[in-house]
Every structure is written in structure tokens, then in C-alpha cells.
Amino acid sequence: MFNPQKIEKKWQRIWQKEKIYETNLEKAKKPFYNLMMFPYPSAEGLHVGNMYAFVGSDIYGRFKRMQGYDVFEPIGLDGFGIHSENYALKVGTHPAKQAKISEKRFYKQLQMIGNSFSWDKRLETYDPEYYKWTQWIFIQMFKNGLAYRKKASVNWCPSCKTVLADEQVINGRCERCSNNVLKKEFEQWFFKITKYAERLLKNLDKIDWSEKVKIAQRNWIGKSEGALIKFPIKLHKARISRGSKTNRGALADLPQPASVEVFTTRPDTLFGATYLVLSPEHPLLQISILNLIKNSKEVKNYIKKTKGKSEEERIAEGKEKTGVELKGIKAINPANKKEIPIFVADYVLASYGTGAIMAVPAHDQRDFEFAKKYKLPIKQVIVPQNIRVNPRIYQRESALSEAYEGEGVLINSGRFNGLPSEKARWLITKFVGGKKKNQYHLRDWLISRQRYWGPPIPIIYCRKCWENLNSKSKNQKLKLKEGIDYTVFDGKEYIIHPVPEKDLPVKLPFVKDFRPTGKGVSPLASVKSFYEVKCPVCGSKARRETDVSDTFLDSAWYYIGYLILGNQKSKSKIENWKLKIENSPFSSPVIRKWCPVDMYIGGAEHAVLHLLYSRFLAMVFHDLGIIHFEEPFSKFRAHGLLIKEGAKMSKSKGNVVNPDEYIKKFGADILRMYLMFLAPFEYGGDFRDAGILGIKRFLERVWRLSKEMSLRAKRSNLRDKKIASGYCPRNDYLLDRLLHQTIKKVTEDIENLRYNTAISALMILFNEIEKNKESIVNSQWSMFLKLLAPFAPHLSEELWQQLRTQNSKLKTFRSIHLEPWPTYDPKLIEEEKFELVIQINGKARDKVLVEVNISQKEAENIALSREKIKNWVGNKEVKKIIFVPKRLINIVV
Ligand SMILES: [Zn+2]
Ligand SMILES: [Zn+2]
């Protein structure tokens, strides 16, 4: 009886004992880094969707190992951070305690599925040995001006009680808890990812990644080519004439020169700009300008009202646009020198361009809607090329029902009339003294979190150092940059110092009340023994930063972490490295050998989170000379998603498949194969209980046949010898050809992650093997087992070992998973022979193997010369012969 549970436990034990999946990181000759996104324990355990992803990655790794590569397939837990902390909060356990529970639970599940993980080199991101490097990275970022503090309007999740990066807000909601995210003004730590926007974009062309992930990154980085154009500002005449001298004085207070700079991707429509819009956060809307306008109270109220709205809410399509005109001042359209009104409106975001736009209602739908509402002029300046009018005389102010946003020919644009819009862009920009400019949607990565469960940000603030500097020359003081060299708390300046590397890690203290405070500070801010610290420079009393870093920083470098922590020799202490980054374990020979990652598999939902952050950090490390490569993952494939009986799995629907139950009932091999059989791995699949039985029956048949064959072991051995001496029984040719065709198919399918069709090919092959079980030889059977090995690792190991012990007296263990992957004979596949069925009066009487292009005459000769046929025909007269090429010959007598 096939008892998967019994053999699976046995082989898992033996594999671990024999360390067959433990790669020697230093000595490996053909390194292949096969990485799967490590799980984050945000629930009780792994669900079947996780298993789906892990198995898919493992099949590829096993395949590469059999192809002769030294495959490194590590595993760990992304257990630091908000997701794990939220789960700990939910179940009411301290996160440190919960981490130990999750470790046990997750690792047990990951063992059960039978993946070829390198367990010796596992890591957890909350291990101080690991996060000292996370902190070290923060320090390198800071020292190189890529980490800075800034007060900004940021995303605040009222439920998680922390700020979030833009990437972690999905459709206005928190990526973790799905609550609506608010905007709040906070001073926070940022990583300067925007500095790498262009390179992050360009390099996408160089890497072999799932196209949908590349598209998502391109969109997120959001490059737009355009121009910066200045609109001079003017106090309204009436205002000046009525006003006193103080008003003229106030004009002088305007930021000089008194103008508003806008970013536009369509400078060709400049003549159609009929008003200007400032975002509520625009620097011009500071006190100075509010004093100059007539309706400052109204404007102030409006600005106040928009503060509570999320960016998504503000720019949502179809939403009614609101705004207030700044009465008493005007802007001047630099193209036609016309005075145009200035509005403040929240559909313009501070984060886009300069935080101000020129509104061209005829050619931008949002501006159009706004202009309609506030009865502002709509002036057409572009007409579609196919309009049959001379654009020079096309002056009709047609009643547009919507904006025309396409390209075309210019009208109403002075000397630019008649030019194609694309050509006019740069000419008009030049005409008004504007500048070409690329704009990106990407914002800097907000890295600080007001939470407990994460690596403390390794920064110290010192007031004394500020005072010491202050007593020195004025010049020196002026060189300090706010946010990089110093910061301000409660109106007092503090110098920012990184924690000296030798003092890493800054350990996260055990804090009983770890719950988020909601006051904009981490729970660590109430732990005096933690935040009170000696200044590393002057030795006086200083303050530690009490925020922790974003969990996505932990995972942005873990693929290097496996190699550093997994390799004892590079586990050097920080004190030993003379503080030079070239000597860091990040540039050790082991990293050179294994990085970048050869194959990375994970979820597409991480496209603009983990996958973007990892690329950014690798580029920074590369530029700082820390690592030798700038793209972390040479190949990335996104796996598909699993659904259940046509519906998305969710707890509320109660249709979440718990893999443990299935492993208990069917064993890992059956579950693995079933998951992979559903659909192409990159598509995902629909999990149906009925379907798994088909795979169960298939593997049971494999098991039974193997048992039958071992009974005939001796005979099989004999046949093997016959083959060696050149004897080839008739059936072996066809079976061999199918076998070789299957090797080709399975090899190509696995390479392309088409596991489902690889499994069907194995099933077809097995059917033929079963039919020919009398003549099947060991060499053929062992090839089948090898092809099956990545999919059903336990069963194939068991049957392979049975075959081995039959064949030889060898007692040393050698796993099937270290056997060479079968190769096919291209000649055997090409050399087309087929089995010609010979019929007498429509009844099959004989079969013979013949060349595929055999002529009717040749087929007749062969058929009639067969002993069997001669007997059937006897003395009868052959009346007719029917020949069906590639199939049969029918002799009518
Ligand atoms: Zn949240
Ligand atoms: Zn100091």
C-alpha cells in the first residue's frame, strides 16, 4: 500500500541527516541561487496559497540541482515589523513571544511540504545578528546623504497608529489593515529613492522579469517628460489703487522673483491656459500672500478643510472639484501676456511637479470640469489633425462637451498656429524661457514607523553638540543642513549622529506595553533606559531616535543576509572591520559568487513594494562600493493566485484551504502535484477537492507498478544487459522515443514554469509504461522516476532507492535528487518510425515498426512477407490493399 505519510517523514529525516540540500557556499562550483519570497507571519500559519508558491519555486530548484548546479534554496521568516506585530496584537501575545510560536509553526509547515530548503542557513529578521546589518545599512544611507529627516504631509494609518510609505497605501487604504489612511504633518525619516528614479526605470529593460511587474514599476515610477514654465504674479490693479503703501510693501515680501512655476507635460497648450491652480500646500500660500488677497479667510478655511483628505480622495475621477479663487492677485500667461485668475484647489497635489499647474480646460478633463463649474473661459488651442479646416482660420469657440486631450495641430496660438502639437512643445517652452524637465510620480521612501516591533533606527540626537558648534564661527554653522546634519525638537536644534558601527546592534528592548501610542511616537519613547544615551561625539547626555524602521527595509536585503549569516567565515564582528565598507561581509567572495539571485519567485503584489525597494538598495550599495552588482534579481517570475471552487479564498467566506489537512490526508507529494497540475504556474489555479483524487490515483498506480516491477527485478536486469549488447525489442523503440520526447517536453516545461503540461506529459508516458510493463527495463523506469522527482520528491526517492538496492549491493546513500537530470537523444526524437498495423479484412492481425515515409509498395512487401500474415492469407487471392499512411495497411482477401 502506498502510504505517503510514512515515506515522507522518513525521507525528510534522511535528507536532513545527510544534508543533501546544504550547499557549501564557499566551495560551490556551479552556484545557482534559487530564491522564494520568505513568508511573513501575519496569521496563524501558512495557507495553501503560500504552499503553492513555495512548491513552484522548489520544483525549479530541484530541477536545477539535478541539472548539475549547486543550488542554494534558503528559507527564513520576515518576522519583524508591523504585520507580525498586528497579529501579535490580535491574539494578545507579546510579539517577541509570538515570534517563537510562529517560528515553530511556520517551519514545521515548510518542512511538511518537502521543499529542498537549506535549513542550516535560515534566518529571522528579528534576530539581532540580522538586524544589526539592517541598522548598518541605515547608517550607510545616512552617511551618504540618502537618509534625511523632513517635515512632510505623510500617510497616517489611524488603526496601525503609524505613518506609512506611499507604496504601502493601496487605493487610499493601509496595506496592512485596509483602513482609510489620513494625511498628517510629521517630521519623519526618508530614503532618497527619487534620486534613482531614472535608473530604476532604465534598468528594467535589462532584467528578465515578469512583464506585469515591470509595467507596475514603470507606472509607479511614473516618468513624464515636460517643461517648467514660470507665470509672473501681479497684484490686481483695483487692489493696488485702493490699497495703501503697505500692500505694495507686501508684494515685495513675495518669494522672489514673484512668479509661480508650473510643471506641464503639454507646453504646446500654453496659449490655452486660462487660469492657474495652486495645491493647498503650495509655499506661496503662506502668510505673505494671504495678506495680499481680499478673501484670505475663505482661502484659509478651504486649505484647512482639505487637510483631512487623502490624495486618492482628492484626485478621484468623477468627483466634483472644489476650489477658491485668490481674489486680488492674478497671474500672467507668459505666452500671450493675458491676465488669468489664480485658484487654490485640492485636485492639485503638492507632490506632483511643483505643486502648481496651468489649467488648460479645453485640453484637460479635470481642468474642463473645474472651468465649467466656476465659469472660466475654455479656449481651444489644439484641433485633431483630421479636421478638414485650415487650422489658421479655425477660430470657432465650439461648445466642447469634454476636453480634447489628444495630439493635433495648434490654433489660437499666435505664431505657432498650424504646427503639430508634438513639435510645438519644445518651441513654445523655449519661447517663454521655460526648461525641459522630467517628472516622476515616485516619492521618497518614508522609512520611520511609530511602532515597537522593528529595528530601532540607529540615530542619536545631541543638543550639546549643537551648542558646541554654535559657539564656533558663523560660517561653520551655516554649512549645516537641516534634516541631514541637525533637526529641531520643541524649538531646539540637535545635531544628528549615527550610532557608531561598533555599537551595533541597537537592541530592541523588551517593552511590556508594546502597543502603538497613537501620539506620533513609538512606545520606545516612554522607555527612558532606552532613549537616554551618551553622545558618541561629546559624551554628554543625548537622545536616541525612538522610531523603528519600516519592515520593508528588513526584506530589501535578506537575499544577501542568507549568505552573510549562512556563511560562518563572514560572520565577522563589526568591530573587526576598521569601519570600511569595502571590508564588510557584503563584499565577501561568497556574495560575489552567489549574487545576484539567479531565479526569484514571488507574488506580483510586491511589485512596487519589496521588489522596488530591493532594487533601489542594491543600486545604492553598488554605487557606494558595498556590492558588485546593481540589480538584485536577474530573473523574477510572479506566480499566479490560487482560488477555491471559483471563488477567492477568504476567512469570511470560510473557504480558506488549510494545507496541513490535505497533507495529513493525502501526503505532500499528492498536494504538490495537484497544485502544480491546476494551470500554468504563472496563472494560478482553482483548487477543487475532486481534482486531487485524480493525482492520488496516478501516484498510486506509479507505486503499484513499481512493486510489480521489483518482483520482476531479475528479468529486468537481464533485459538491460541485452540492450547493452545491441538487442532492441520492438516495444522499446516506441517507448524509448516517447521517453525521450517526454524528457524534452518536461525539461522545457519546467524551465518555463509550465508544470501542468509537464505533469500531463508524465502521465502520458506512464500510461505507455504501464501498457508495456512486461518489457520495461530499469533504465527506462529510472528515467521516469527522475522526471517525476521534482514534483513528487518523496515517492520518487522511495522507488528510486528500491531500484538501486535491487541493482547493486551498494549500501551508501545517494539521493535521486542529486542524480543527473535525464537528457534526450535528439536523433531518436527526429527519426520518425511508426507502428504499422496490418489488417486482414479490417481486423488487426499484426504490427510492425516501419519508417514514417514508407511507400505503399514497401508497406505491402513488408506486410505480405510477415509469417503471421502469410498464414492468414494462405492461398486466397488478394483482392484489394488499402494503405493509410502512418497508420495501417488493410489486406482484403
Ligand atoms: Zn493600518
Ligand atoms: Zn554631543
Image (cartoon, rainbow, N blue to C red):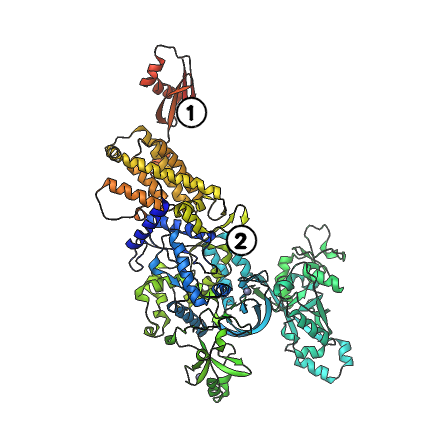
Q: What is the distance, in whole Å, between disc 2 and disc 1 at their CAs?
A: 56 Å
Q: Nearer the viewer, residue 884 or 678?
A: 678
Q: Quadrant of residue 836?
A: top left
Q: What percent of the width, then of the height, locates residue 424?
A: 64, 60
> Observer-nearest residue: 339 or 202?
202
Residue 64 vs residue 357: left or right? Answer: left
Picture quarter with the C terminus: top left
Residue 754 in sight from this viewpoint: no
Residue type, label 1: Pro
Q: Which numbered disc, 2 or 1, marks the residue that appears first in the sequence?
A: 2
Ligand 2: image quarter: bottom left
Quadrant in the rendering for residue 824: top left
Compared across the picture, whether 111 is left or right of 717 comes to right
Please say if 667 is above or below 29.
above
The residue tagged with tag 1: helix, strand or loop? loop
| Local crowd size for mark 2, using a 10 Å CA cut-off: few (<14), some (14–19), many (≥20) | few
- Residue name at image x 24 percent, y 40 percent: 807
Name the mark nearer the viewer: 2 or 1.
2
Amino acid type, callout 2: Ser
User: In the displayed structure, does residue 259 sit left or right of residue 130?
Assistant: right
Give the vertical position of 824 relative to 287 (above or below): above
Q: Is mark 2 within 8 Å of ligand 1?
A: no
Which residue is depicted at the point 35% across and 48% down?
8
Provide the residue designation for mark 2. 650
- The N terminus lies in which quarter of the figure? top left
Q: Are marks 2 and 1 in contact (CB under 8 Å)?
A: no
The residue where tag 1 is placed is: 885
Q: Which mark is residue 331?
A: none
Q: Position of residue 516 (x, y in %)?
A: 52, 71
* Mark 1: few/some/many CA within 10 Å (<14, 14-19, 20+): some
Count of numbered labels shown in the rendering: 2
The location of residue 873, given as percent across then percent down, is 36, 13
